Image (spheres, helix red, strand yellow):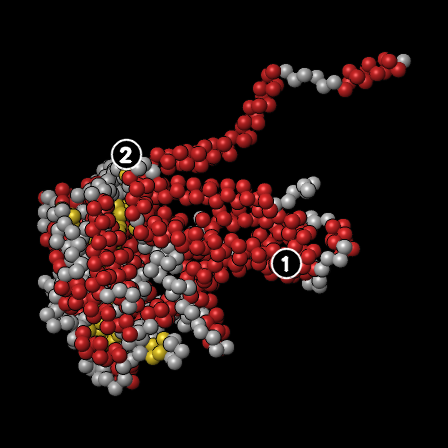
């Protein structure tokens, strides 16, 4: 459970992709450059694969076309060991000029001096760049007050609900849950478990959703990390984990097996909601096109994640993909120009046309407001909800620390302990706090 | 006349002594032929081996130069609960898998050594799992072990038996992996089979004349005669078990609740996910010592139970 998180960076629809790729041919703008200007060659690594490689390659091609003096060569490195390859390349003095990374590694890399401080480049025409991004998106890329990774594509999270299941359970599909108490009550009516204990249908199961539920309990990164240490036994963290504890009444092993067993069962989809096997799921915008691909007849709706009393409705936890300039880049200035261009800064009209080819949520409200992106949102009105929540001041991220990756792994374990009934919420969070702080100590 | 011939023949039988230059050239050619292996060994085996000993006394994360911290990595291991958990998991797997796989492999080899119809087919069938790539067979077994959709639990439920959680249960995950490994013991079976075919028939004939039954022939003739092969397979099995990694990496990632976090998997996580290369090097050296001790122990004990031809 929770493995889908890594996949968010690359999961999007073939349908959007296809239409987008067709549209992307219209990106070009005529360059005006002296013929004898020297050409700088950049190496760019990312961890995309399959059709997403094509989407990003189109963007790179467009950059090369419009920037004749900077030519970028893109390489897809395997996502299973991309970070390891990057660090090895840096150590060997052969670092790429640009690397696309997902958020949990940023602070760790910055602390190990594996990344260049992007704030030093934000002068002159790039002076306004820091404030160009959604504030919550920029925070993930910052370490000790400086930006080390530039936001590129973002993810927000909402609640998907299966309308057919609601009807079958005697619920009103036009009145999806708005509070977590209502979600708990509604989902309980949708489980199907055989007398042998085999799970056949899930109502809602929160495994891996701890972070996504942060704003729903009014939690901020400060509730979990005080700037020096993790504080996981705080009242807000306890409230979230107490909600998890309610779900220990469901057979953990069977639910786990049910969800894992779906992998590939329907020709590639691994999501019980997409396959019509779950009543509710918290997920990102990429779920919509994959539903269209794997189960187009599914009757579903999307609403902001229900809240606890004191929580913030119509908000989201945010994560995404970020562009970095590794230490040792041979052409950092040109690399910065490249990633700033990809981010859509002073280039929003292009980004508004290009991002929909990947089904992406932009990193800045300026791009979202562009006519091309508004047109993309109007094509499927539910998309707009994912973009709207990016504007909330209560949007949250996980505390950015050098041990974030370790913390997220241990947080997943803590959730499982509670769902399985092996530990109380307090025990699970206390253990998480101890091991995360221990790890933090070791990295100093 | 004969003397002359002898002298001539004697001269012919003595090879001319090669010149020093020729000897040197031959030596050079020999070194050149063997140099790819020597360079590979020095660069990719000996150097990392020695370097890892140095790194095991340092704090090293690839990017920064290693810092000498003495024996802190080894001290930290003692305090690290996951280190002990991974050691326990590995010893559990070794202690359960090696004896069971030895008994089953010998039993199957004995069956495959019988002269029955379709023997070649049976031998092929038992060896077949060994040629399936580990990752592919791991994914196959993930399906078979699935408590909701898997064949094994469906079968158990159909005959009214309780269906375990297999890979999703911390109590069952290690037995599941042992069970899966037993499926792939085709290689030791083939080695045992070769050993069995080297047992002289006259020993069995003598045993029959003495009135030995089948079990006695196996216990007093076959097992002693193939005991060197058993020693060989047990040592290989021990080393393989201590280094158990791929299946756990593919199937469970160490879960649930670290119940399948084997030593080599934890070492990998420390090295390449946490970038604690010093700590991982220390773990690697401990693993080396463990394997060395276990192998020496088996070797020493072999004097009591391994029979080499000609011994009394």
Query: Which numbered disc covers residue B68?
Result: 2
Query: Which numbered disc covers residue A263?
Result: none
What residue is rendered at 21% in x and 60% in y? Answer: A429
Quadrant that contains the C terminus of chain B: top right
Residue A260 against residue A188 in the figure, above or below: above
Crowding near pointer 2: few (<14 within 10 Å), some, many (20+)? some
Residue located beneath label 1 in the image: B123
Specify the quadrant of the image occupied by residue B55.
Answer: top left
Give the camera-side residue of A104 and A325.
A104
Give the camera-side residue of A286 and B262.
B262
From the viewer's perspective, is the residue at label 1 or at label 2 nearer? 2
Kindly give the residue lying farthest to the right in the view shown. Answer: B1
What residue is rendered at 54% in x and 41% in y? Answer: B300
Quadrant that contains the N terminus of chain B: top right
What residue is rendered at 40% in x and 34% in y? Answer: B50
Contact (Cβ within 8 Å) of mark 1 with mark 2: no
Q: In terms of secondary structure, where does tag 1 sit? A: helix
Give the camera-side residue of A209 and A266.
A209
Quick check: do tags 1 and 2 share a chain? yes
What residue is rendered at 31% in x and 51% in y? Answer: B81
Q: In terms of secondary structure, where does tag 2 sit? A: strand
Crowding near pointer 1: few (<14 within 10 Å), some, many (20+)? some
Q: Estimate the x, y position of residue B68 in percent, counting from the top left.
A: 28, 34
- Can residue B142 be seen by looking at this rendering? yes
Q: Estimate the x, y position of residue B9 in percent, counting from the top left.
A: 81, 18
């Amino acid at each position: 459970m929770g493995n889908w998180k890594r996949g968010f960076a690359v999961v999007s629809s073939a349908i959007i992709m296809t239409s987008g790729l067709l549209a992307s041919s219209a990106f070009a703008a005529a360059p005006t450059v002296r013929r004898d200007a020297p050409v700088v060659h950049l190496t760019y690594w990312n961890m995309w694969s399959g059709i997403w490689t094509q989407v990003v390659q189109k963007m790179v091609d467009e950059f090369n076309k419009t920037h004749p003096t900077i030519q970028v060569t893109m390489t897809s490195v395997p996502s299973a060991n991309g970070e390891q390859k990057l660090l090895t390349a840096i150590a060997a003095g052969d670092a790429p000029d640009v690397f696309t990374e997902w958020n949990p590694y940023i602070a760790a890399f910055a602390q190990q001096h594996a990344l260049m401080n992007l704030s030093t480049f934000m002068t002159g025409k790039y002076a306004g760049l820091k404030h160009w991004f959604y504030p919550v998106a920029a925070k993930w890329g910052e370490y000790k007050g400086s930006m080390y990774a530039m936001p590129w594509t973002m993810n927000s999270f909402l609640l998907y609900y299966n309308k057919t299941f609601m009807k079958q359970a005697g619920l009103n599909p036009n009145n999806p849950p708005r509070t977590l108490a209502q979600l708990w009550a509604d989902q309980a009516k949708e489980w199907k478990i055989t007398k042998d204990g085999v799970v056949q249908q899930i109502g809602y199961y929160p495994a891996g959703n701890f972070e996504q539920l942060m704003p729903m309990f009014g939690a901020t990164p400060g509730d979990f990390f005080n700037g020096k240490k993790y504080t996981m036994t705080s009242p807000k963290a306890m409230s979230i984990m107490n909600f998890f504890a309610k779900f220990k009444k469901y057979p953990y092993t069977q639910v786990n097996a049910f969800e894992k067993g779906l992998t590939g069962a329907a020709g590639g989809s691994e999501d019980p909601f997409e396959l019509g096997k779950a009543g509710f799921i918290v997920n990102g915008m990429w779920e919509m096109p994959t539903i269209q691909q794997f189960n187009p007849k599914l009757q579903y709706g999307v609403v902001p994640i229900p809240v606890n009393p004191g929580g913030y409705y119509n908000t989201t936890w945010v994560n995404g993909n970020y562009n970095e300039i590794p230490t040792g880049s041979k052409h950092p200035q040109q690399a910065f120009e490249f990633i700033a261009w990809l981010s859509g800064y002073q280039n929003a009209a292009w980004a508004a046309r290009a991002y929909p080819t990947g089904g992406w949520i932009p990193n800045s409200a300026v791009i979202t407001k562009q006519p091309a992106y508004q047109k993309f949102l109007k094509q499927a009105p539910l998309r707009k909800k994912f973009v709207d929540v990016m504007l909330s001041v209560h949007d949250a991220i996980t505390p950015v620390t050098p041990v974030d990756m370790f913390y997220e792994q241990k947080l997943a374990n803590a959730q499982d302990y509670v769902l399985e009934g092996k530990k109380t919420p307090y025990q699970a969070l206390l253990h998480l706090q101890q091991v995360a702080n221990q790890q933090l100590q070791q990295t100093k | 006349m004969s003397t002359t011939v002898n002298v001539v023949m004697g001269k012919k039988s003595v090879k001319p002594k090669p010149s020093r230059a020729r000897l040197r050239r031959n030596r050079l050619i020999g070194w050149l032929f063997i140099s790819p292996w020597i360079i590979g060994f020095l660069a990719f085996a000996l150097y990392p081996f020695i370097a890892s000993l140095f790194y095991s006394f340092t704090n090293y994360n690839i990017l920064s130069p290693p810092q000498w911290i003495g024996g802190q990595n080894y001290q930290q291991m003692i305090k690290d609960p996951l280190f002990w958990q991974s050691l326990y998991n590995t010893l559990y797997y070794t202690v359960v898998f090696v004896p069971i796989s030895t008994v089953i492999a010998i039993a199957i080899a004995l069956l495959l050594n019988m002269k029955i119809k379709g023997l070649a087919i049976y031998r092929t069938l038992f060896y077949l799992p060994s040629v399936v790539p580990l990752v592919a067979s791991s994914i196959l077994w993930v399906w078979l072990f699935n408590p909701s959709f898997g064949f094994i639990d469906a079968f158990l439920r159909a005959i009214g038996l309780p269906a375990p959680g297999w890979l999703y249960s911390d109590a069952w995950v290690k037995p599941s992996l042992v069970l899966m490994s037993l499926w792939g013991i085709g290689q030791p079976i083939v080695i045992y089979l070769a050993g069995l075919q080297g047992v002289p028939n006259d020993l069995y004939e003598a045993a029959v004349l003495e009135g030995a039954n089948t079990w006695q022939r196996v216990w007093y003739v076959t097992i002693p005669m193939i005991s060197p092969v058993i020693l060989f397979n047990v040592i290989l099995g021990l080393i393989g078990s201590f280094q158990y990694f791929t299946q756990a990496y593919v199937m469970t990632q160490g879960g649930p609740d670290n119940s399948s976090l084997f030593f080599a998997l934890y070492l990998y996580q420390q090295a390449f996910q946490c970038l604690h290369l010093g700590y991982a090097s220390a773990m690697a050296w401990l693993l080396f010592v463990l394997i060395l001790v276990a192998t020496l122990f088996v070797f020493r004990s072999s004097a009591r139970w391994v029979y080499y031809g000609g011994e009394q």
